[in-house]
C-alpha cells in the first residue's frame, strides 16, 4: 500500500490516500533481508503520517508493525536464514553510534536519520515504481506482500507463532510493556495509571499487571477500551469522557492512595500528559509514551520536580533491545501471562487499509491486522 500524499481529508475511505499498486522490489543487498510479509498491524504512527501530523517523504510504502518469513538474505547476514519466522522492529540499529554502544538501540542515531529520509539503514530504497524510488517507512514498509529490510530489523520467533499474533510484538507490545518494565522499571506493589488505551496503552496495562503493580488504573474516553483494560490487567477503570480533567485526576489520585508511583501518558497530547503528571504522587515517575506532534510543547509546575523529587521520562519503543525483549515477551504470551492477542480488533485485507485508518481515528479500533492475501 503506497501512500501517495499526506494530509488527505478524512474519511480516508473516500479520499483514499493509500493505494494498491505494483512495485519493483530489488533483491536484498549487503546486510539486508527479503521477507514475505505474514501480517501487519495498523498503528497511530501510520495514521500520523497519513494525516500529515508527522511529516514524511512521499510516495511511501507504509506500515511499520509486522512479521514475516525470510525468503532471502544478503551478504553478511548470519543471524537469520531463509524459511525462518521473524518479527520486525521499527528501529534498526547500526551497533556503533553512541546510543547503540551504550546498549540503547531504540535511540540509534543512524536509524533516526534513515527514518526521516525514508530509507533503510543502508541508505537504499528497495521498492520502486516506473524507475522512481518509493520511500521506506520506519525501516519496515510492511503494508505489502514482500519487503526488504535491514538485518537488524528482524528478530527470530518460533515458527508456529501465528502471524496475527506475531505482528503485535513489533510495536504495541515492545512499546507499551517496555515502558513499564524497562523505562519506568516498575516493581511489585507500585501503583500505576495508564492514560490512553489504544494498542500501546493496553499493552502498558498488561505490563503493569505483569510487573505486579497494584492498583493499576486505566483511563480513556471510550467505555469499551476501559472495559477491555479491566479484562487484561487493570484493577480500576476511569472513564474520562464528559468529565473535567481535574475530576479525572482526583479519581486517579484517590484510587492510588494519593497519587500513582508511575503514570504513563500514551496519547501523545500535552493536555493528557499534564493530567498524568498531576495524577502522579510524591517521588513518582511520569512517562511520556505517546508520540506528540513535532510542534507540541509541555507546561508543568516546576517546583514539584525538586520539592517532591518527581521524575519525567520519555520512552521510545519501550526502551527496548528487540533481540532481547521480543523473545521474552513472546515466551510470556505463550505462557498465558501477557495476553497481547486481546489487542486485535479485527483482521482484513490490505485493500481495507483506508477504512482501517478511519476506524483508528474514530477510536473504535485498537489493533487491526492486515493480511497480504486477505
Image (cartoon, rainbow, N blue to C red):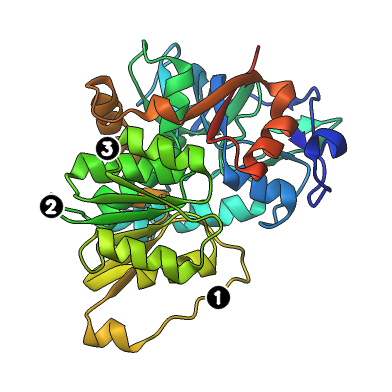
Q: Earlier in the sequence, mark 3 or mark 2?
A: 2
Q: Residues at badges 3 and 2 in contact (C-beta under 8 Å)?
A: no
Q: Nearer the viewer, residue 319 or 238?
A: 238
Quarter of the view holding residue 141: top right
Q: From the viewer's perspective, is the residue at label 1 or at label 2 nearer?
A: 2
Q: Nearer the viewer, residue 302 or 321?
A: 302
Element assignment for label 2: loop
Alpha-carbon distance for marks 3 and 1?
33 Å
Element assignment for label 1: loop
Alpha-carbon distance for marks 3 and 2?
25 Å
Q: Position of residue 200 (x, y in %)?
A: 44, 44
Q: Residue at x 78, y 42 (%)?
A: 59
Q: Earlier in the sequence, mark 1 or mark 2?
A: 2
Quarter holding the N terminus is top right
Q: Residue at x 27, y 64 (%)?
A: 254
Neighbour tally class for label 3: few under 14, some 14-19, many 20 plus, Cα within 10 Å: few
Q: Which mark is residue 324?
A: 3
Q: From the viewer's perspective, is the residue at label 3 or at label 1 nearer?
A: 1
Element assignment for label 3: helix
Relative placement, left or right, of 317 versus 56 is left
According to the picture, the residue beneath numbered tag 2 turns out to be: 189
Q: Which mark is residue 13?
A: none
Q: From the viewer's perspective, is the residue at label 3 or at label 2 nearer?
A: 2
Q: Earlier in the sequence, mark 3 or mark 1?
A: 1
Q: Nearer the viewer, residue 56 or 73?
A: 56
Relative placement, left or right, of 336 versus 269 is left
Relative placement, left or right, of 98 versus 366 is left
Neighbour tally class for label 2: few under 14, some 14-19, many 20 plus, Cα within 10 Å: few
According to the picture, the residue beneath numbered tag 1 turns out to be: 297
Q: Position of residue 8 (x, y in %)?
A: 83, 48
Specify whether residue 162 is in view.
yes
Amino acid at each position: 500500500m503506497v501512500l501517495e500524499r499526506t494530509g488527505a481529508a478524512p474519511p480516508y475511505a473516500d479520499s483514499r490516500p493509500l493505494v494498491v499498486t505494483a512495485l519493483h522490489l530489488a533483491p536484498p543487498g549487503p546486510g539486508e533481508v527479503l521477507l514475505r510479509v505474514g501480517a501487519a498491524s495498523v498503528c497511530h504512527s501510520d495514521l500520523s503520517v497519513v494525516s500529515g501530523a508527522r511529516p514524511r517523504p512521499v510516495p511511501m510504502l507504509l506500515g511499520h508493525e509486522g512479521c514475516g518469513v525470510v525468503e532471502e538474505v544478503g551478504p553478511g547476514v548470519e543471524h537469520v536464514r531463509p524459511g525462518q519466522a521473524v518479527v520486525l522492529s521499527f528501529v534498526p540499529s547500526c551497533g556503533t553510534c553512541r546510543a547503540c554502544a551504550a546498549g540503547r538501540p531504540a535511540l540509534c542515531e543512524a536509524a533516526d536519520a534513515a527514518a526521516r529520509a525514508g530509507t533503510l539503514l543502508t541508505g537504499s530504497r528497495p521498492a520502486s515504481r516506473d524507475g522512481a524510488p518509493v520511500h521506506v517507512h520506519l525501516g519496515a514498509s510492511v503494508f505489502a506482500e514482500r519487503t526488504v529490510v535491514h538485518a537488524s530489523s528482524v528478530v527470530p520467533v518460533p515458527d508456529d507463532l501465528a502471524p496475527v499474533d506475531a505482528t503485535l510484538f513489533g510495536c504495541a507490545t515492545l512499546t507499551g510493556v517496555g515502558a513499564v518494565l524497562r523505562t519506568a522499571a516498575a516493581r511489585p506493589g507500585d501503583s500505576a495509571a495508564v492514560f490512553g488505551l489504544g494498542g500501546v496503552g493496553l499493552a502498558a496495562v498488561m505490563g503493569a499487571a505483569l510487573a505486579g503493580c497494584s492498583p493499576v488504573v486505566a483511563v480513556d474516553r471510550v467505555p469499551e477500551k476501559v472495559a477491555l483494560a479491566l479484562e487484561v490487567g487493570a484493577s480500576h477503570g476511569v472513564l474520562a469522557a464528559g468529565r473535567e480533567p481535574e475530576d479525572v485526576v482526583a479519581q486517579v489520585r484517590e484510587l492510588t492512595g494519593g497519587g500513582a508511583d508511575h503514570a504513563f501518558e500514551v496519547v501523545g497530547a500535552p493536555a493528557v500528559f499534564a493530567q498524568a503528571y498531576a495524577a502522579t504522587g510524591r517521588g513518582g515517575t511520569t512517562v511520556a509514551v505517546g508520540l506528540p506532534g513535532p510542534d507540541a510543547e509541555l507546561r508543568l509546575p516546576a517546583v514539584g520536580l525538586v520539592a517532591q523529587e518527581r521524575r519525567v521520562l520519555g520512552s521510545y519503543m519501550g526502551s527496548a533491545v528487540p533481540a532481547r525483549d521480543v523473545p521474552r515477551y513472546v515466551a510470556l504470551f505463550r505462557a498465558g501471562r501477557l495476553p497481547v492477542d486481546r489487542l486485535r480488533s479485527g483482521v482484513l485485507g490490505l485493500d481495507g487499509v483506508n477504512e482501517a485508518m478511519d476506524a483508528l481515528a474514530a477510536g473504535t479500533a485498537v489493533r487491526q491486522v492486515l493480511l497480504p492475501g486477505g
